[in-house]
Image (spheres, helix red, strand yellow):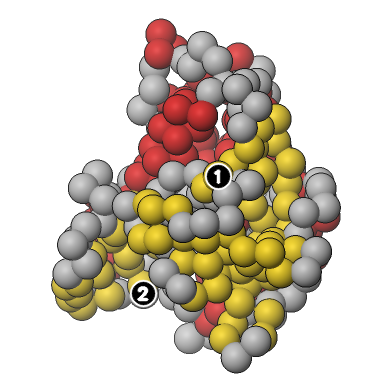
Amino acid sequence: MDIEQVDAYLGRLGIGPSDRPAAPTADVLRELQLRHLRTVPFENLSVHLGEAIVLEEDRLLEKVVGARRGGFCYELNGAFGALLEALGFGVTRLAARVHGGEGRLGIPYDHLALRVRTAEGSEWLADVGFGAHSHYPLAFAERGEQKDPAGVFRIVEAGPDLDVVFDGRPQYRLEVRPRVLGDFVAGAWWHSTSPASHFVRSLVCSRVTEDGGRITLSGRTFKTTGADGVREERELGTDEEVLGVYRERFGIELGSVPAVRGG
């Protein structure tokens, strides 16, 4: 990324050129992750709009920054990792398999997460692409409870791998072997084409709100969850309402309402 791309990305997160981070510190990483979660939606609209998902840095920046869209894990953490590297952080891309309950794990390269090293030498698990996850990076070497606005997290040894646990429920099993973005192409293809993929079977657009809650649009169902956990939902009746929520609550301009492929 060149300096113009960095400034454009930071601008997407509400940070002007004069406030560009001076050093890749843990505090900066915390701020960037939270801003990302509040600003850039977790969404799978491309799957249902017939848009190609291309795991190349320029294409990811074009989508997330230029088009002011979101994406799912490969896109969001792919773009975020590029920004962090450009700001001087050490970034290692890691593969994970999502826990499906009853001991089941998802496909290889099911998820992309980031191991980030700061100027102070601390290491963190940063993740802006899992949907409901920690608001702040998790200390990578810590094995005790880590309290976060989203809940309580733990990183647990699982043989040679690590399990990321949220409020007592395993979220994903993380490998520690370094990967490159191109390693995840097959996973992105499977998640965007396979009938077995939940991204193919459903529509989702979600982000963290400024008060620490979350808003989610699933098809025509708009859900609001407060920081206190209280949830409200309502059905949107018209296409204009749906497009208005995409535009006003997620910053996404669409010409037509997306529909589940084949649905």
Work out which quarter of the rendered image holds the N terminus and state it. Answer: top right
- In the picture provided, is 48 more to the left or to the right than 204? right
**Residue at the extreme front:** 144
Contact between marks 2 and 1 (CB within 8 A): the answer is: no
Which structural element holds mark 1? strand
- In the picture provided, is 96 more to the left or to the right than 29? right
Q: Quadrant of residue 199?
A: bottom right
Q: Residue at x 58, y 49 (%)?
A: 142
Q: Residue at x 55, y 15 (%)?
A: 23
Instruction: Work out how far the residue at label 2 is from the one at label 1, CA to CA, in angstroms.
Output: 35 Å
Residue 113 in the image: x percent, y percent? 64, 52
Residue type, label 1: Ala
Residue 77 in the image: x percent, y percent? 60, 47
Of mark 2 and mark 1, the one earlier in the sequence is 1
**Residue at the extreme bottom:** 102
Residue 234's disc is: none
Out of 123 and 258, give the one closest to the viewer: 123
Question: Mark 1 = which residue?
Answer: 139
Q: Residue at x 37, y 52 (%)?
A: 148
Out of 138 and 260, give the one closest to the viewer: 138
Residue 23 higher or lower than 32, as above or below:
above
Q: Residue at x 35, y 57 (%)?
A: 150
- In the picture provided, is 122 more to the left or to the right than 246? right
> Is residue 192 something that shows in the picture?
no
Which structural element holds mark 2? loop
Residue 109 in the image: x percent, y percent? 75, 64
Residue type, label 2: Gly
Is disc 2 surrounded by few (<14), some (14 to 19) or many (20+) residues within 10 Å? some
Residue 219's disc is: 2
**Residue at the extreme top:** 18
What is the number of callouts on the image?
2
> Is residue 86 something that shows in the picture?
yes
